[in-house]
Amino acid sequence: DARVTQTPRDKVTEMGQEVTMRCQPILGHNTVFWYRQTMMQGLELLAYFRNRAPLDDSGMPKDRFSAEMPDATLATLKIQPSEPRDSAVYFCASAPNRGRAFFGQGTRLTVV
Amino acid sequence: DQQVKQNSPSLSVQEGRISILNCDYTNSMFDYFLWYKKYPAEGPTFLISISSIKDKNEDGRFTVFLNKSAKHLSLHIVPSQPGDSAVYFCAANSNTGKLIFGQGTTLQVKP
């Protein structure tokens, strides 16, 4: 049963600490997205990759966020330093080319 | 700059009646549209999609309508069931593969 796997499911951290969220996309999917769920913006696109190359990361605060795909089986989203306003649920999704995207269960981040 | 907009944060309907969820977009480069459903503590799941070459797509109780001239799409659920209660997201895909979502509409179906 192919699925997108995100770790950790929940993360509580102190302000100023580095946070790393990981995502294993579905095998064979060449497009990977990172979204943040907020009340006002809904599902806000942070960054996306095709064939591991970043295509657009204009949705990310550049000074503190970074997204990478070290290999085809792993995507990471890092926040350094983290701030309370970063508290949200972060979703990873993967898709085959332009087909429908499949989402992971999300990482709930709380920065205190 | 919200390119995909769902202007109704919530909708409440009676079981058995029709639910209509609306979505507007601004970018004429979008050519593929999707609806996702989300339950609490879960990731969004795909529901139905439509290509810009069509104006209607139907799958069981779910129908999506696309009005390109108005840059508007809608999702109809008929008959609505209590299990349909969830947050519904509209999404639009451009030819670059970028997938943009709206703010979501919370649907409550009352028994």
Image: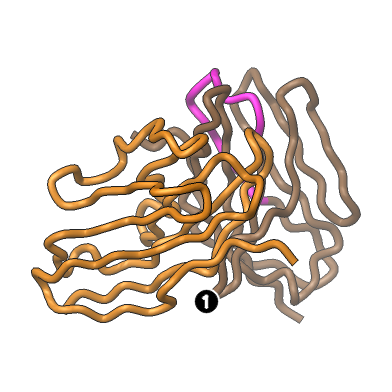
Chain colours: A orange, B brown
| Quadrant showing the N terminus of chain B | top left
Q: Residue at x 55, y 35 (%)?
A: B24
Q: Amino acid at mark 1?
A: Ala
Q: Nearer the viewer, residue A106 or B18?
A: A106
- From the viewer's perspective, is residue A73 above or below residue B14? above
Q: Nearer the viewer, residue A8 or B96?
A: A8
Is residue B29 within the magenta segment?
yes
Q: Where residue A22 appears, x then y in whole percent?
A: 40, 63
Furthest residue toward right = B60
Furthest residue toward left = A16
Q: Where residue B81 appears, x then y in whole percent?
A: 80, 71
Q: Residue at x 75, y 75 (%)?
A: B83
Q: Where residue A108 appears, x then y in whole percent?
A: 38, 73
- From the viewer's perspective, is residue B41 above or below residue A45? below
Q: Where residue B12 appears, x then y in whole percent?
A: 63, 67
Extent of the magenta region? B21-32
Residue A31's quadrant in the figure? top right
Magenta part, dominant SS: strand
Q: Residue at x 58, y 32 (%)?
A: B93
Question: Which class describes the residues within 10 Å of circle 1: few (<14), some (14-19), or many (20+)?
Answer: few
- From the viewer's perspective, is residue A109 above or below residue B104? below
Task: Answer left or right for A80 relative to B33.
Answer: left
Chain letter belonging to callout 1: B
Task: Answer left or right for A32 relative to A55.
Answer: right
Q: Residue at x 57, y 52 (%)?
A: B89
Q: Which residue is mark 1?
A: B41
Total marks shown come to 1
| Quadrant showing the C terminus of chain B | bottom right
